[in-house]
Structures are given as structure tokens and as C-alpha cells.
Image (cartoon, rainbow, N blue to C red):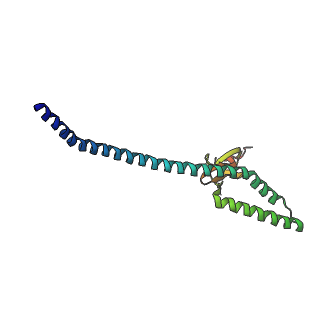
Amino acid sequence: MKYMADEKKEPEESKKEEPKDAEKDLAETKDRLLRLAAEFDNYQKKTAKDIDNAKSVGKAELVKALLPAIDEFELALSSFNGSDGDKERAKGVELVFTNILATLKSAGLKEISAVGKYDPYKHEIIMAEKSKEPEGTILEVVRKGYTFNDMLIRPSSVIVSKGNVSEDKK
């Protein structure tokens, strides 16, 4: 009889242990679910950021491809002389140029300021000349530089000063 009594006690003990194991399993599953939800949330944020970055880079590439056309518009505007027919054409070209530039600026295009001291992150030196200005001072802008949404897409090509010119002694 003792043998049968022992058998009856075992199922009762396993019933007492089952709730503890079930609670432990539930807690572990809940923890895994929370971690998985957090990982998925981070994945969504990273993916959205990557998509926005890719869009911005794509737009910057398009704007970069349009910069030579902008340069040519500026060159065309400067080539018109003072005759009446040229004034009419100049107004038309200037209107188109202004509209294109305004659209690009509203999308994030900014012209780089090329006044004052040379900045290696924004300017590209194509020549250095002797002048009365201090060394590294920008003397002339040969080609305008641009940023697009704070991303450099083309540096300004500039001529800088070599330094003070001393008068030749006779």
C-alpha cells in the first residue's frame, strides 16, 4: 500500500510545480516578445532613416547634374549686350533662370559664400596670385560652389592671394 500512496503524491507534487514553471515560461515569453517588439521598432526607425537619406542623396545627385546648366544660364545672361533685341531675350532667359534657381533653392540648394578667407571644406583653389591682401584671402570666384541640404555637392573654385606684395627695390 505504501507503493500506491507514493504514486498518488507524485501527481499532486507535479501539479504544484506546474504553475511555477508556467509562470516562469510566461515571464520568459513576455520578455522575448518585448525585446522583439523593441528590435522591430528600432528596425523600422533605421529603415525610415535610410530611406530618407537615400532620397536626399538622389536629389543631391540630380541637382549636381543640373549645375552645369545653371552655370551656362549665368554665362548666357552675362553675354547679352545693350541692344533692344538683346534686352528682350535677356529678360526671357533671366525669367527662366530665376524660376529654375528658385525651385532648386526651395528644395535645399544654397550657394557657398566665397568671401574672405579660404576654407578647404568649401573652396577649391585653382590659382594663387600675389596681391596686397593677406595670404589665403579669396580674390576671385571662378565657379560658384553649392550645398544641397547641408551636403557639399560642388566646392567654389577660387583664386586666392599668395600674400603681401612687397615693392620692388630699384
In the image, taking residue 28 as reference, residue 57 lies left or right, namely: right
Please state which of residues 136 and 152 is positioned toward the viewer in this rendering: 152
Q: Is residue 102 above or below residue 67?
A: below
State the residue at coordinates (67%, 49%): 61
Q: Position of residue 77 (x, y in %)?
A: 80, 60
> In the current view of this chain or complex, which residue is farthest to the left?
1
Which quarter of the rendered picture does the N terminus lie within?
Answer: top left
Total numbered badges shown on the rendered structure: 0
Q: Position of residue 5 (x, y in %)?
A: 12, 35
Q: For this rendering, which residue is in front, 135 or 88? A: 88
Residue 167 is at least partly visible in this image: yes
Residue sitting farthest toward the front: 1
The residue located at (44%, 46%) in the rendering is: 39
Q: Is residue 105 left or right of residue 18?
A: right
Between 142 and 129, which is closer to the camera in this rendering?
A: 142
Q: Position of residue 138 (x, y in %)?
A: 67, 51
Q: Is residue 54 left or right of residue 21?
A: right
Quarter that holds the C terminus: top right
Classify residue 13 by image quadrant: top left
Residue 7 image offset from top left, x and y in percent: 17, 34
- Asked which quadrant contains residue 80, the reply is bottom right
